[in-house]
Image (cartoon, rainbow, N blue to C red):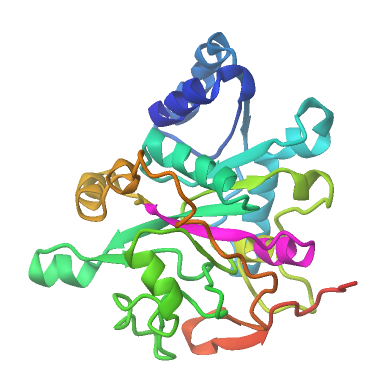
């Protein structure tokens, strides 16, 4: 929350709306967020705070995606129901429960603008449990592998049909172009991502009525962020990119070590650089085929536009 408030102050509180959907907390989170209203409004920003007690973990996986899509849409409801309150160039900064710095948020906003992107994502990581347990060292595994797909249509790293993650450290092993950009901490285009935090244009939500959703009867099972990206592509918003300079994690006890290893945004950003060497050469078309799975043993390739009615 401190990082969010810092970002609001930098961007200008009068330009910002903070929307939070809180659910099922029993540790005082609701009370703290409720009391935060006065402070946020004193800054000059709007504060939309709602509660939702639905539990995505209580039902089967299909229902879980429907619930998660509903929660995400609830956070955006003021924008989608009453878009007249918002400027035409409004952008959405959407965060999971990640450990994040203010500069992480601002770098995503900057790259969305600089790259003229429709959507940009961070990179989220987890400590490799095998290394922690057996070697007491720290290697990092990309986290959001279920959602993220490169421009080859493949996942960011290969998971075998037996469920082995033995290739987890070999990110983009079949995509040398994306691999080179990742290693250089340069933004690169992807088919889909979420990766803990995203920034995207509000235009697809307002003009094209795109929403988070579960798959239809004519579509293979997928997560709601991947389907969101699919719908962006189908409406002409395919400028989607990952920003490796922004490294995020979900557990505070590992956050400092991750930043020390992967680097802070300020580690990678050259403030004196004034050229277009890091500008993405956008591809207009999505990959023809995209990998999806419900379980590791059901991985398959499908047409990216499976089940869509395209003009």
Quadrant occupied by the C terminus: bottom right
Q: Residue at x 79, y 76 (%)?
A: 217
Q: Is residue 168 above or below residue 81?
A: below
Residue in the image at 54% along x and 59% along y: 241
Specify whether 127 is left or right of 196: left
| Magenta highlight on residue 243 | yes
> Residue placed at 54% from the left, 61% from the top?
280
Q: Is residue 176 left or right of residue 69?
A: left
Name the spot of residue 302 as percent of width and height, x first.
Answer: 67, 85
Percent across and percent down for residue 31 are 48, 22
Give 139 or 9, whichever is nearer the viewer. Answer: 9
User: Quick check: can you spot residue 120?
Assistant: yes
- Farthest top residue in view: 42
Residue 77 falls in which quadrant of the image?
top right
The residue stretch that appears in magenta? 229-245
Query: In the rendered view, does 1 fall on the left or right side of 90?
Result: left
Q: Is residue 170 above or below residue 19?
A: below
Q: Is residue 149 above or below residue 186?
A: below
From the top left corner, tell me how far across and down residue 210 is, in percent. Answer: 78, 54
Q: Quadrant of residue 13?
A: top right
Q: Is residue 87 magenta?
A: no
Residue drawn at 72 percent across, 69 percent down: 215
Residue sitting nearer the eye, 274 or 142:
274
Name the residue at the right extreme.
Answer: 311
- Single out the residue that lies furthest toward the front: 275
């Amino acid at each position: 929350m401190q990082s969010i408030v810092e970002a609001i102050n930098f961007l200008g509180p009068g330009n910002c709306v903070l929307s939070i959907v809180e659910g099922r907390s029993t540790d005082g989170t609701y009370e703290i967020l409720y009391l935060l209203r006065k402070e946020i409004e004193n800054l000059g920003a709007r504060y939309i705070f709602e509660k939702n007690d639905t539990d995505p973990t209580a039902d089967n996986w299909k229902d879980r995606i429907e619930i998660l899509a509903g929660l995400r849409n609830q956070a955006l409801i003021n924008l989608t129901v009453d878009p007249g309150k918002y400027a035409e160039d409004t952008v959405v900064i959407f965060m999971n429960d990640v450990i994040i710095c203010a500069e992480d948020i601002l770098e995503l906003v900057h790259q969305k603008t600089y790259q003229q992107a429709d959507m940009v994502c961070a990179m989220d990581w987890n400590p490799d449990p095998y290394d922690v347990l057996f070697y007491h060292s720290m290697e990092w595994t990309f986290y959001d592998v279920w959602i993220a797909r490169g421009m080859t249509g493949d996942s960011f790293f290969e998971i075998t049909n037996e469920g082995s993650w033995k290739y987890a450290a070999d990110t983009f092993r079949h995509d040398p172009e994306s691999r080179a950009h990742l290693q250089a901490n340069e933004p690169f285009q992807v088919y889909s991502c979420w990766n803990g935090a995203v920034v995207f244009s509000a235009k697809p939500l307002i003009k094209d009525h795109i929403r988070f959703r579960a798959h239809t009867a004519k579509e293979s099972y997928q997560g709601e962020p991947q389907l969101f990206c699919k719908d962006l592509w189908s409406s002409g918003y395919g400028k989607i990119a990952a920003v490796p300079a922004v490294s995020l994690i979900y557990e505070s006890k590992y956050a400092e070590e991750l930043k020390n290893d992967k680097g802070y945004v300020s580690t990678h950003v050259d403030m004196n650089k004034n050229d277009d060497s890091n500008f993405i050469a956008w591809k207009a078309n999505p990959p023809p085929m995209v990998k999806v799975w419900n379980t590791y043993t059901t991985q398959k390739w499908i047409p990216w536009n499976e089940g869509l009615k395209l003009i």
